[in-house]
Amino acid sequence: LHLLKEVKVLQEQMKSGKVLAAHAAKTLSVMFADNRALKEQIDMNRIDFLLSVIDSDASQRTLYVDLLALLLSNRNVGIKRIQDHVVDRWLLNRRMRQLIINTVSPDGGIVQLSMFPEPVEGGRMRGGPIAKSKKVDLEALTVSATSNSSDSKEKELYALYKANLRLLDALCKGCNSDAQTLITSGEKDRRIMSFDALLQCVGNERLPASLRALHVSLMHHLFVQRPSTHHIRPLRTTFLRSELENIAAQEETLLDPLFESDLLAAQKAHDLKREVIETMSQNTNALVPEAQDGHNGLVLATTRLCHELLRCGYFS
């Protein structure tokens, strides 16, 4: 209870200038890290405050988005109460949705970031209702943002994009179907993330390993993860004959989970398995030269994705 009172105090400090806001946000991050009990008890007004400063303070948006993402899950388990609130107040809000950076693939082999102008009151975009999104090539951005001579705006955009990925990933943890649907649906130019665009990022060796790790984790929780009870039948030692006949009849009518009822179609599952195998083979050898920053994170995220594919029956 004492810590919850401190949350309000620290959030008030986030209104008192850039430096103090950064320190307050970092303190909150430490308080909430791996503390599910504290996250479960947080008042939704505190979440609304974060959403409001994400909307109003573009200079500190990356910091606040990362803090919000931290509150959405704990040790890869989603906190549905907070997830649903953010889905309602952000993904379903026309004004706030314009702040999300979409990942699009207009052509095979090309991945772009699609961003709309800063929203104004009423949910409209600057430039009028027909304002078009701005496209930025993802590979070019990573090269520029990670170079020593890069422009500060490119570094800020790159950092914000990674924070967006962490937020989307946290929204989907625990198989939050509402978040998954809103992220993957809509018109092509306004869709937040498609399977094809995400798959290209997962397998693109020209992207930094730390960024690919975020894409792999999002692939895991957005398209692959299933509830822990998926396809698991309670263990019983004896059955009546009529029960066995009923079970057999049901099994005959069930769709194959890989080819029909899952989010992944057969070809998509095949493509994803190919990329997972390729990534694992290129990054798990102890003799891999010139390991990049974030290499271990990529290996860990890919291993978790591979484990989920095995658990769901995508590998025989």
Image (cartoon, rainbow, N blue to C red):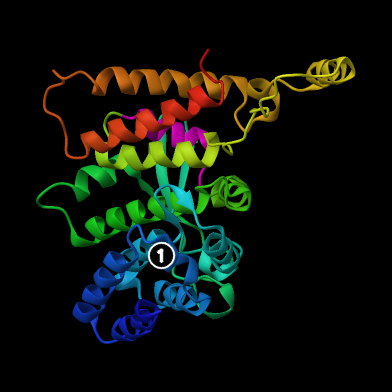
The total number of labels drawn is 1
Magenta stretch? 193-204
Q: Quadrant of the N terminus?
A: bottom left
Quadrant assignment, res 303: top left
Residue 157 in view (yes/no): yes
204 sits left or right of 253 in the view? left
Element at label 1: helix
Q: In the rendering, at what x and y percent does residue 104 appear?
A: 47, 43
Q: Tell me the residue that label 1 is attached to.
A: 68
Where residue 234 sits in the image (x, y, percent)? Answer: 67, 29
Check residue 165 for magenta coloring.
no
Q: Residue at x 56, y 52 (%)?
A: 190
Q: Amino acid at mark 1?
A: Leu
The x, y position of residue 216, in whole percent, is 39, 36
Of 49 and 192, the residue lying toward us: 49
Identify which residue is drawn at 26% across, 32% down: 206
